[in-house]
Amino acid sequence: MTTIRVPLQVVFEIHEIEGGGYWAEASSLPGCIVQAESIEALKKNVVQAVEDWWTGSPVKTEDEARQLAEIQGSSKPVDASFPQPYDYQRPPSWNDEDE
């Protein structure tokens, strides 16, 4: 097997989680979201998140949707139909000024 490595720059927007921890999203990779208790751990998790995004399924399961909603401060997913596409858009009420 031959492997080709492609250097890739992906920009993640980092957000603090109320009560502790951080989550980050890559707008250029829809649905590529990661969380961690510290910035150092978040940096490590970002690499795995990008790898998972490239090799993962283009849809999320109900369990994944509920986990994402919880991370983002909601008690239920944005849409109740499953599987959901990974083209999640941030709600208009979210803005970085609130952080």
Image (cartoon, rainbow, N blue to C red):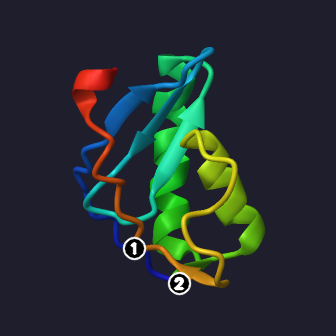
Q: Which residue is mark 1?
A: 87
- Residue 3 at what x, y percent from top left? 43, 74
Q: Is residue 79 above or below residue 63?
A: below
Residue at point 53%, 84% (across, down): 1
Name the kind of residue labelled 1 in the image: Asp
Residue at point 58%, 39% (across, down): 73
Which of the two labelled residues, at mark 2 and mark 1, occupies the earlier sequence position?
Answer: 2
Identify the element where label 1 is drawn. loop
Q: Is residue 91 above or below residue 80?
A: above
Residue 52 or residue 14, whichever sits in front: 14
Whether label 2 touches label 1, CB < 8 Å: no
Residue 62 or residue 31, whichever sits in front: 62
Q: Residue furthest right?
A: 63
- Residue 84 at what x, y percent from top left? 57, 80
Quarter holding the C terminus is top left
Label 2 Cα neighbours within 10 Å, binned few <14 / some 14-19 / many ≥20: few
Relative placement, left or right, of 92 versus 79 is left
Q: Is residue 70 above or below residue 89?
A: above
Depth check, mark 2 against mark 1: the one in front is 1
Identify the element where label 2 is drawn. loop
Disc number at residue 50? none
Residue at point 22%, 24% (across, down): 97
- Residue 78 at what x, y percent from top left? 54, 65
Name the kind of residue labelled 2 in the image: Met
Residue at point 53%, 44% (across, down): 34
Relative placement, left or right, of 41 versus 87 is right
User: Dividing the picture into quarters, in which one does residue 83 lie?
Assistant: bottom right
Q: CA distance from mark 2 to mark 1?
A: 32 Å
Residue 75 or residue 34, whichever sits in front: 75
Relative placement, left or right, of 19 versus 10 is right
Q: Which residue is mark 2?
A: 1
